[in-house]
Image (tube, rainbow, N blue to C red):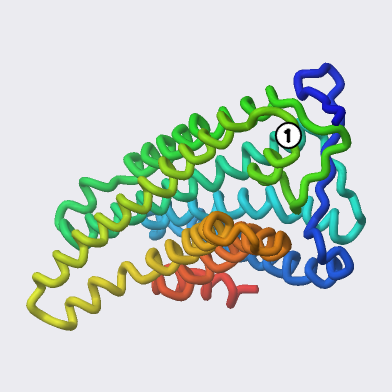
Amino acid sequence: MSAFNLTASSPPTFILNGIPGLETAHIWISIPFSLFYVISLVGNFTVLFVVSKEQTLHKPMYLLLCMLALTDIGMSTCVVPKALCIFWFGFKTITVDGCLTQMFFLYMFAVTHSAILVTMGFDRYVAICDPLRYATILTNARIAKLGLVGLIRAVLLVLPVPLLLRKLPFCANPLILHTYCEYVAVLKISCGNTSINQTYGRVITIVNIGLDLTFIVLTYGLIIRAVLRISFKKAHWKALNTCTAHICVMLMTYTPFLFSALTQRLHPGITSHIHILLTNLYFLVPPMLNSIIYGVKTKELRNKVGKYTCRM
């Protein structure tokens, strides 16, 4: 089989197939895609606008919420516009550079998103377990530094992904069976040895999801232990209620990813269109719901949003 190498001076293009097996339903599938994307943009930009305008919201928790909103906007924007171009206009081609760029920013935003969730867990731990020192431990400057560390970690982890892919030979006229340049889908059309790429992909999963989830679980273990030491039951509920928004966002983020990863490995016979829909949901549903969850569960933010809504 003929092949081309990505190091060539004039690299050819890839073809994104969309959702194989459901081509006739692409127009109908585009409706929830576009709806989720619009809701995500409106919700997250509303959070950014309200927090930036309200001086009383210039606190560590809301700074973290703004970081989360930015990564949500970034993740969904990396996926949805190109998917809608495929669904609506049949624009399936993407340059090699465009594909690798999309992949880099998509996974960079995802890894940063996970780091922010870890920082949010630490924020809740300090707020419940050491409330008297909260203002001195978690300042806005310190939160900004933690966010920068999360971003740098994401860049360092994800940057080798496109660099390693660029060294691979790919089959002529390669067809990517996906709506975006998903890492595994791109590896499947390579004519070369992808063992290094596959190993590094597992390393990213372990470092990003494995370590981050472990840290979050340990954090909530310490929170639950501290809450159980409180003698009043009302205090139990009040303390845990401050964590519900973060728990909901965390479940919305990690559950689709883990479910997709497990079904792909434990049930390799699962139809491709189901797996593709699941991976797309990971970049569609959490960005749409995160701002809604925090808007509903956080009274102070809810009141400020209501104030600006009433002015319109």
- Residue at 29%, 52% (x, y): give it: 122
> Which residue type carries mark 1?
Ser
Tally the numbered discs: 1
The answer to whether residue 143 is left or right of residue 288 is: left
Residue 192 location, x and y as percent? Answer: 70, 28
Residue 267 vs 165, above or below: the answer is below
Disc 1 secondary structure class: loop
Residue 27 location, x and y as percent? Answer: 86, 68
Q: Which residue is mark 1?
A: 190
User: Which image quarter holds the C terminus?
Assistant: bottom right
Residue 220 location, x and y as percent? Answer: 26, 61
The answer to whether residue 300 is left or right of residue 166 is: left
The answer to whether residue 209 is left or right of residue 265 is: left
Q: Nearer the viewer, residue 185 or 135?
A: 185
Residue 167 vs 138, above or below: the answer is above
Q: Callout 1: few (<14), some (14-19), or many (20+) C-alpha neighbours within 10 Å?
A: some
- Residue at 46%, 75% (x, y): give it: 296
